[in-house]
Image (cartoon, helix red, strand yellow):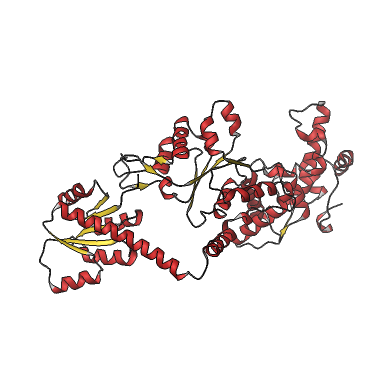
Amino acid sequence: MKALPTILLVDDETHALAAMRMALEDDFECLTAETADEATRLMEENFVHAIFCDHRMPGKTGVEFLSEVRDRWPETVRIIITGYTETNDMIAAINDAGIYQLITKPWHPDQLMMAAKNAAQLFRLSREHDRLSLEMRFMGKTAENKVEARRRTLREGFGFERILRGPNSPMNATVALARQVASFDVPVLISGEAGTGKDIMARAMHYASLRSDQSFFELNCVGLPDDVLRLELLGARKGALANLPSTKIGLLQKASRGTLFLNGVDSLSPEMQLLLLRVATEGSFEPLGASETLTTNTRLMVGSHADLTRAVADGGFRKDLYYALAATELTLPALRDRLEDLDILASHILAELAAEHSKPVEGLTSLALEFLGNYDWPGNLPELSNELTRMLILSQEPRLGPEIISRHILQADPSVRADPRAADVLTGEGTLKDRVEVIEARILRETLTRLKWNKSRAAEELGLSRVGLRSKLDRYGVAQPGKYDPAEEED
């Protein structure tokens, strides 16, 4: 069932508004306002086809209000209602406001209905005329070239080029599959840990699809209660909720003909899974407080932080919904599984942060990249961005070195972690002496790196003598990987 045209009724008399609404509400979605300011707010929040406005109101007159509407929303059909004999000056003012029709009081319900239907038809024809005029203007260019030019422009800002990766990146196979799937109008399930860039992948696929000239919307479902999710997805009619002063258009209606990306579907309750199943299989839904069923032509893309096949097997996710959403499934690797991309990612993120905070830097030292590349990054890209932000704030040099890296990352140094005993010394196997030695070696390397290998300061901080520190370094094979300014190292 198609959505009803929206009519805005403006009158400072409550009984007049109620009468107009009663005459039109069976065939139109009616919004009401008692002042011009309230009507302006409704225009900003809703897609209005036509306005019926009383002329004599406190504050702005109907002509003054409709003149402002003409400037801001020229497509909306404007109709004025008056109970007074109009002078020639009034008629001129109506013409200046571009008013489509004048209705005198008392009006008949059939008269009002006919005017509303004509206004809705005029709005539709005007939109169609604008569309045809635009197509005629570019008639010399083929449709294929127009679409390709549009996609090329969008891809530059939102396409697969935003997914940074190296020539041998594990992400390359996923991107290649995503490119192939993008142009097919089927649902897509994107799996991966939180922070792996599922939203970026979904947006890139949208702008590489045949829907690239339509809107892209996204909603993170994680942590949202069911009532909020229903309102965001379905929308609601005015009065459906106590705290909802006007009609709210839901994402399923906004994204029709475009793409809707729902991230975190693995967190949906059984009730919300059932609602999403109906949308995925039938394309139908009912806004809150509405009696009619609406349809949507949105392309669904969903993201999951968990393995949905395991969730289906465990009974936590509906099997029929999984198959409805996973016509194509993409899996994004975690950052720890694509550390060969770390140099590209870190350089790009650092450049953006430097521009955002107006603090120019030249990049990261090779030793800093070595430390960053040995860390597991359980928080993936957001954690990397946070660490680089911290380093940028603390940096005193144009090139960021390892001494300002967080201590828990410094302790995951390559030369120490290469020891198989270092994988997890707290829960792993081995004698107490061996496991303590692994931890001790990590602490030595982290402390010396943070202090730029100033052995005097390191020995003082660790409560060791210079001889004792040197003995431990020799014992564990902890050596300085790079040279700093000799003036900073006390021998």
Horizontal and vertical percent for residue 61? Answer: 20, 64
For the N terminus, the quadrant is top left
The correct choice, above or below, for 346 with respect to 438 in the image is below
Along the viewing direction, whichever of 251 and 328 lies nearer the viewer: 328
Task: Using the image as rendered, state which of residue 38 and residue 387 is in the foreground.
Answer: 38
Q: Position of residue 269 (x, y in %)?
A: 48, 32
In the image, taking residue 166 as reference, residue 473 lies left or right, namely right
Residue 454 image point, x, y percent: 81, 50
Q: Is residue 183 above or below residue 243?
A: below
**285 sits to left or right of 454:** left
Can the viewer see residue 262? Answer: yes
Residue 486 in the image: state x and y as whole percent.
Answer: 84, 57
Residue 56: in sight, yes or no?
no
Quarter of the image for residue 63 reads bottom left
470 to the left or right of 59: right
Question: For the image shown, how many numbered marks are present on the structure?
Answer: 0
Q: Quadrant of residue 117?
A: bottom left
**Left or right of 214, for residue 48:** left
Looking at the image, residue 467 lies above or below residue 107: above
Q: Which one is nearer the viewer's eye here, 397 or 4? A: 4
- Is 433 located above or below residue 444 in the figure? above
Q: Residue at x 82, y 58 (%)?
A: 485
